[in-house]
Amino acid sequence: MLLKDKVIVVTGGAEGLGRTTALQCADIGGRVIVADVNLDGAEDTARTITSNGGRACAVAVDLAREDQVARLIEQTENIFSRLDILINCAGILLNAGQRVDQFNTESWTQVIEVNLSGSFFCVKHAVPLLEKSGGGVLVLLASGAGIFGGSSSVAYAASKGGVRGIALCVKSQLQPLNIRIHVALPANMATHMKIKAAGDSAERHGESRQEAEAKIRAECASPEASATFLAELVSDDGAVAAVDHLVIGLGDWEGLKAAVR
Ligand SMILES: NC(=O)c1ccc[n+]([C@@H]2O[C@H](COP(=O)([O-])OP(=O)(O)OC[C@H]3O[C@@H](n4cnc5c(N)ncnc54)[C@H](O)[C@@H]3O)[C@@H](O)[C@H]2O)c1
């Protein structure tokens, strides 16, 4: 049981990578707070965990609201009395395929608030409880979109590049507190976000939404492999393999472990 008794907050836990990660963390012994703006979805994930014999609780949170993120951490302390790990999987992608000069500023703000400010709020409010618990692990989900390029949305790419900036800045602040931070880059996954972005982008370019969505379903992986990687990364075994790696591609866990051995 790699995560035996660890207390783990997984944001975006209602669906996609967050849901799969929450289920896998619970399967290997973690006690999970499933956090999401979609409370029904988060409750469904938590119920699935408890009906399999695991421990979980759902909490509603809008990551764009600092007061709600602060309350999420307070509730975590009230429920489980500590925090060992936070994995920030929540995220949005808007206006896929929209050229920058037509990109709607309201959508820009929304994406930056959820993806970038939300990541900052998670780190800011989790750190004191992690410190009080003796240290721990923070994982922020970024994307190749903000690091290597190739995104369909300027706001999404900017937000994900910014997430890396947060980690670059705070890594050395957190080391003396025994807190490590990683930025995780999943390979493309056939989740709601990716399928909708492909459909929106195709439609904007006069192409078939159905065909674009079907292509993503056929070509992209399900989130299981990335979730398995994340669950191992945040464990004490992960500390041995990944302690000095800030940005980690979720396709390459075995390679990373082999390189360290
Ligand atoms: N799917 C991919 O191919 C891919 C690739 C690279 C990076 N990522 C990143 O991985 C993470 C997970 O993406 P996914 O594909 O599972 O997406 P998804 O759309 O399937 O799930 C995202 C989850 O975030 C929640 N959420 C959205 N806004 C929120 C808010 N304001 N507050 C709290 N929760 C909110 C949603 O309700 C949903 O449960 C995201 O950060 C995404 O940017 C995904």
Image (spheres, rainbow, N blue to C red):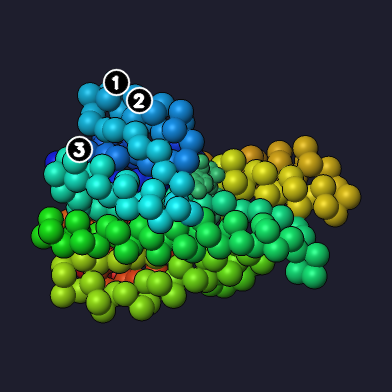
Asked if the residues shown at circle 2 and circle 1 are in contact, with their CB atoms under 8 angstroms apart, the answer is yes
Question: Taking 186 as reference, is 73 left or right?
Answer: left
What numbered label is drawn on residue 104? none
Question: Taking 157 as reference, is 52 left or right?
Answer: left
The residue furthest top is 51
Q: Which residue is mark 2?
A: 48
Upstream in the sequence, badge 3 or badge 2? 2
13, above or below 44, in the image = below
Question: Between residues 185 and 117, which one lies in front from this camera angle?
Answer: 117
Q: Residue at x 44, y 33 (%)?
A: 39
The C terminus - image quarter: bottom left
Q: Quadrant of residue 148?
A: bottom right
146, above or below 80, in the image = below
Distance between mark 1 and mark 3 Cα atoms: 19 Å
Tell me the amino acid under the disc marked 2: Thr
Residue 136 location (% of width, % of height): 20, 59
User: What crowding class fits label 2: few (fewer than 14 Cα within 10 Å), some (14-19), or many (20 or more)?
Assistant: some
Q: Which residue is mark 1?
A: 51
Q: Is residue 144 visible?
A: no
Residue 177 location (% of width, % of height): 16, 70
- Label 2 CB sits under 8 Å from any ligand 1 atom: no
Tell me the amino acid under the disc marked 1: Ser
Q: Which residue is mark 3?
A: 79
Q: Residue at x 85, y 54 (%)?
A: 205
Tell me the amino acid under the disc marked 3: Ile
The N terminus - image quarter: top left
* Element on which disc 3 rests: helix
Q: Residue at x 48, y 36 (%)?
A: 38
- Which circle, 3 or 2, is nearer the viewer? 3
